[in-house]
Amino acid sequence: MGNFQKLRVWQLAKNLAVKIYKLTKSQNYSKDFGLKDQIQRAAVSIPANISEGDEFGSNKQSVRHFNIAKGSVAELQTLLIISHEINYIDLETRNSLENECNMISIMLNKLIKARNS
């Protein structure tokens, strides 16, 4: 505990958040402030909650934040689906980002199991 930057799941989540910020600089999101804000907040919430959870002294508090991060992953996936369906992003981009979300979610599940035992 307490060295979140070394956690592979945090590294992947942080990189995903950076990708989302770069993606939402595109013309499609430029005037859709609501969706742009929501997708950015969901993306940044993932590594933020992982780091916060890892800094807690108790596993119970850590697991709570890791579960919040998992919820943010699901929120981000939903926003990616919507972004695709309204033609803000193409299918290839959606699938690539969703695969990253799935990997992060799997890794969070393993981290939660480890901290619960």
Image (tube, grey):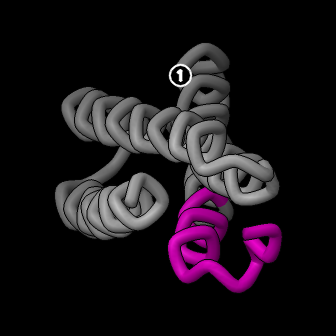
> x, y (%) of residue 40?
63, 38
The quadrant in which the C terminus is found is bottom left
- The stretch drawn in magenta includes residue 42: no
Q: Main secondary structure of the magenta part?
A: helix
> x, y (%) of residue 78?
29, 31
* Residue pictured at 34% horizontal, 59% vertical: 113
In the displayed structure, would residue 58 be above or below residue 6?
above
Depth check, front residue: 4 or 63: 63
Whether residue 34 is visible, yes or no, is yes
Depth check, front residue: 112 or 28: 112
The amino acid type, in three-letter code, at marker 1 is Leu
Q: Is label 1 in a helix, a strand or a loop?
A: helix
Q: Residue furthest top?
A: 34
* Residue pictured at 26% horizontal, 60% vertical: 102
Which residue is denoted by mark 1 in the rendering? 35
- The stretch drawn in magenta includes residue 7: yes
* Residue pictured at 53% horizontal, 22% vertical: 35
The quadrant in which the N terminus is found is bottom right
Residue 21 left/right relative to 117: right
In the displayed structure, would residue 11 be above or below residue 107?
below
What range of the chain is rendered magenta? 1-17
Residue 76 left/right relative to 19: left
Q: Residue furthest front?
A: 117
Whether residue 26 is visible, yes or no, is no
